[in-house]
Amino acid sequence: LDTMKATNILLLLSASSSYYSPCCALAMGNDRRVLVTGAGGQTGQHIFRKLLAKPGYLPIGTVRSEASRQALLEGTAGIGAPEGACAIPPESVAVCDITSDDASGLDELMKDCDALFIATSAKPAPTGEVDEETKRPKFGFPNGEPDLVDFAGQKRLIDAAKKANKDIHIVVCSSMGGTDPNHPLNNLGKVINEDGSSSGGDILKWKRKAEVYLIDSGMPYTIVHPGGLLTAPGNERELCLGVDDKVPGTDNNSVPREDVANVMIAALENDGYRGRSFDLVSKIVGEGVVTEDYAKLIASLGGENADYSLGETA
């Protein structure tokens, strides 16, 4: 990747609190290089575009295929190109399939990185079949089962980061629900075999296994477990943190993807987020005070961290 080409991108910062600055920030020699996986997805693209617009960062977004890369550059992938957003520099997007045994390009992408954002996840989709017992649609994972994407793929990323630099801060977008082995999300894509055993699915268990692997790796980390992800705008709600699927202060169990991106980026800018694993939801719009101070937000959690003796890993 020729990062020097990014120096040709003009800097025009917005003085308002709008989502993006109109143009990507000018790359400087001391910018923090950040690898963002899943940059073509919805949450991943929020992270990627915000970092592109933020001075002091040189983000490299990864997508799974050349078709996904073109869609991201054209503004037709994930959240699309928000109004007023600058065009994404082509040299800032790389094709890297983390589920492939051939991850030869991953070492080069990780070179000189200060941080790694993991926003990849197996994505369920209807198979077109109906469950005879429940009469509900069956779901599968056409682009990779959770064991391949949420564990093996994440493990490959963690290993590559550790190989490149043991100080790379790894920030993971995971999911709430991990303390409940019987959570409905674990049933998506699960198949009951003739002998009564099951295969496939268990997405939260595989995510949890990857999280334990990251913690045990000794790498700096922040693990965010969002509640139900919303496409609604961010920066409009009070955010609430908790652990182990319990968040005090609200009964709401959802949060805008953009706010998840804000918290994940804040993890790079406040040491209070290092070595932390927590749940994240928001209050409804108009309830409480809109969160602006992310240092205060993590401080509200005290010393609590997720308890991985709860729930199950795959």
Image (tube, grey):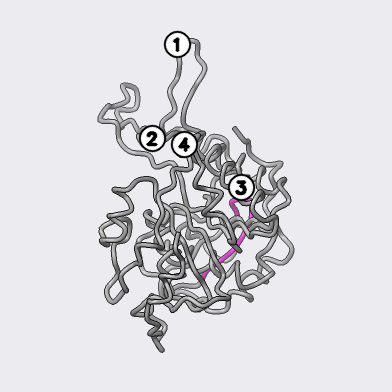
Tell me the residue that label 3 is attached to.
Answer: 158
Q: What range is drawn magenta here?
A: 239-246
**Front tag of 4 and 1:** 4
Of mark 3 and mark 2, the one earlier in the sequence is 2
Relative vertical location of residue 99 with respect to residue 223 in this rendering, above or below: above
Tell me the residue that label 4 is attached to.
Answer: 100
Dot 1 falls on a residue whose secondary structure is loop
Of mark 4 and mark 2, the one earlier in the sequence is 4
**Front tag of 4 and 2:** 4
| Whole-percent x, y for residue 269 in the image | 61, 73
Q: Of the residues shown, which amino acid type is indicated by label 4?
A: Ser
**Front tag of 2 and 1:** 2
Q: Of the residues shown, which amino acid type is indicated by label 2?
A: Phe
Dot 2 falls on a residue whose secondary structure is loop
Is label 3 in contact with label 2 (beta carbons under 8 Å)? no
User: Which disc is residue 25 wearing?
Assistant: none
**Front tag of 1 and 3:** 3
Which of the image's four quarters has the C terminus?
A: top right
Which of the image's four quarters has the N terminus?
A: bottom left
Residue 248 sits inside the magenta stretch: no
**Separation of marks 3 and 4 at Cα, in angstroms:** 15 Å
Q: Residue furthest top?
A: 195
Of mark 3 and mark 4, the one earlier in the sequence is 4
**Front tag of 3 and 2:** 3
Q: Residue drawn 72% across and 67% down?
A: 302
Label 3 crowd bin: few (<14), some (14–19), many (20+), radius 10 Å: many
Residue 243 sits inside the magenta stretch: yes
Tell me the residue that label 2 is attached to.
Answer: 141
Q: Position of 33 compared to 10: left or right? A: right
